[in-house]
Image (cartoon, rainbow, N blue to C red):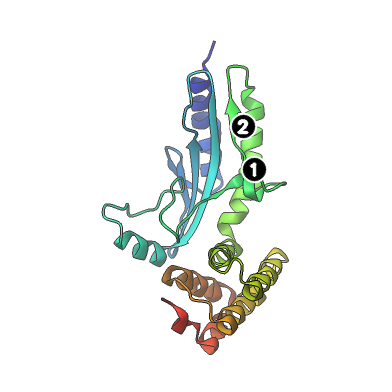
Amino acid sequence: MTSAAELYADVLRQHIEPRLRELGLVGSRGCFELRDAGVWRLLGIQRAAGNSAGRVRFTVNLLVVGKGVWEEVRGGVPGAPARPSPNSVHGKGVRPRRIGTLMPGGQDHWWEVTERTRPERLVRSVLSAVEGHGLPYLVSPAALLLAVVEDIAVRVRGQKGPADALRSVVALVDNGEVELAVDDLTRVVSYYRVPLLRAEYERLVLVAEWVGAGDSLVEAGIEGLVG
């Protein structure tokens, strides 16, 4: 009988990885990217700790980060790779997102493989999640903007004014109004004098350029809040 570890490796090699390449991602060994001159858009397949021959658990991670941001981060980390790993946390500014948080229910999700797992069902489940939730996240400027908002929200937690205002920014993004969300976030940062990390500011500039909202950042002068 095929072990869980062998089944997992076979499904990955013969079905999941080839389909990822068909979708435009390049890579191998559980790390794939959508090539982009200015942004790392990465998908990683992460195995859980403590797996065995009879049981393998794994999930999919997604990472979207500007290449300028990553160069700044890796400059302070001796030995950091030229490309970040979607399966690792790289300080405050570079954190992957689990695909389960993008799926219905918004909960962390791990697939489990045992000797009884039906390969075709596993393949359908993983690729459905990737194509329905993972890939749209990687190609959307909204992903980068939400990452900025989430980082800021952590720092202003407990401060009613900016915390409430940031929720309105998230609502705009969720409604597909990314350009308006950039304008709104700029006003929130400026009005409440919210300090920005350099990595956050560079991400915000990148999104603003994508959606044609760069003028709002200049007019608000929020670069002066970058520390």
| Residue extending furthest toward the top | 1
Q: Which residue is mark 1?
A: 129
Query: Which one is in front, 224 or 130?
Result: 224
Quote the CA–CA distance across marks 2 and 1. 10 Å
Q: Which residue is mark 2?
A: 123
Label 1: how many Cα within 10 Å (few below 14, some 14–19, many 20+): some
Label 2: how many Cα within 10 Å (few below 14, some 14–19, many 20+): some
Helix, strand or loop for disc 2: helix
| Residue extending furthest toward the bottom | 219
Residue 141 badge: none
Image quadrant in which the C terminus is located: bottom left
Helix, strand or loop for disc 1: helix
Looking at numbered disc 1 in the image, what kind of residue is underneath it? Ala
Query: Which one is in front, 102 or 122?
Result: 102
**Quadrant position of residue 118:** top right
Name the residue: 66% across, 34% down. Answer: 124
